[in-house]
Amino acid sequence: MRIPRAELETYRGASVPDVLSDGVKLVFVGVNPGLRSAATQASFANRGNRFFPALHLAGITDHVIDTSSGFRPDDVDQLAKRGVGLTTLVNFATAKASELTDQQLVDGRRSFEATMAAFRPRVAAMLGVTAYRIAFSSPTATTGRQEIAIGETRLWVVPNPSGLNAHYSLADLAAAYREVAIAAGIQPYPPDAVADVVTSR
């Protein structure tokens, strides 16, 4: 579904619903929604984003979810059955996450912590270390398991799946996401149950 740029611009500041359910084990935390996600009301709707291909390659889903035109109900159901949730640190759409102010990131932490306290997943995985460092006042933080927790929820930082993050290949992303899934108690699908995906993205 093609959305003209002028129309996308009208979604600045819009919010996108979380994908969270009772019994969620692992929550992936994006920085904030992009304009296409705001337009489609679905996370990671930009086709250049590698989140869902990496999630599949990690063995967390049994196919590559496509949210470019919005979520399909069966895809939301699969995430729920697998114990996977999606939220954002700041639920305020921009063209790029770099447009957010430091104060917006700090303020977003409070809302995020309240959400984690309500759903109590085992693991929350922040997608990107730069926003994490600002929001959690941890300027030297690196990817991996963090020392702090929110109640019962352990915090991890994993690589951002944006196509702009060229430091990490799709295989690198999948390895990191698989690690947090296992930490959360989610058993990945075996490699032979995961269909081929393009690993050069």
Image (tube, grey):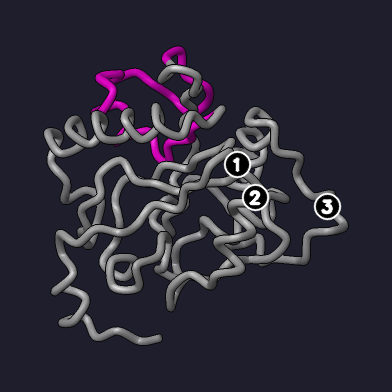
Q: Residues within 10 Å of mark 3 (few under 14, many from 20)?
A: few
Real-space Cα separation, disc 3 to disc 2, in angstroms: 13 Å
Circle 2 residue? 171
The structure residue drawn at horizontal position 28% and vertical position 73%, both measured from the top left corner, is: 39
The structure residue drawn at horizontal position 76% and vertical position 66%, both measured from the top left corner, is: 196
Real-space Cα separation, disc 1 to disc 2, in angstroms: 10 Å
Which secondary structure lies at badge 3? helix
Which secondary structure lies at badge 2? helix
Q: Measured from the top left, where is residue 88 in percent x and y? A: 34, 46
Instruction: State the extent of the magenta-drawn residues as a range.
Output: 123-148
Q: Amino acid at mark 1?
A: Tyr
Callout 3–callout 2 Cβ contact below 8 Å: no
Left of 141 or right of it: where is 124? right
Q: Measured from the top left, where is residue 132 in percent x and y? A: 33, 31
Q: Amino acid at mark 2?
A: Ala
Q: Which residue sits furthest front?
A: 22
Q: Residues within 10 Å of mark 2 (few under 14, many from 20)?
A: some
The quadrant in which the C terminus is found is bottom right
Circle 3 residue? 191
The quadrant in which the N terminus is found is bottom left
Callout 3–callout 1 Cβ contact below 8 Å: no
The structure residue drawn at horizontal position 43% and vertical position 78%, both measured from the top left corner, is: 69
Left of 144 or right of it: where is 1? left
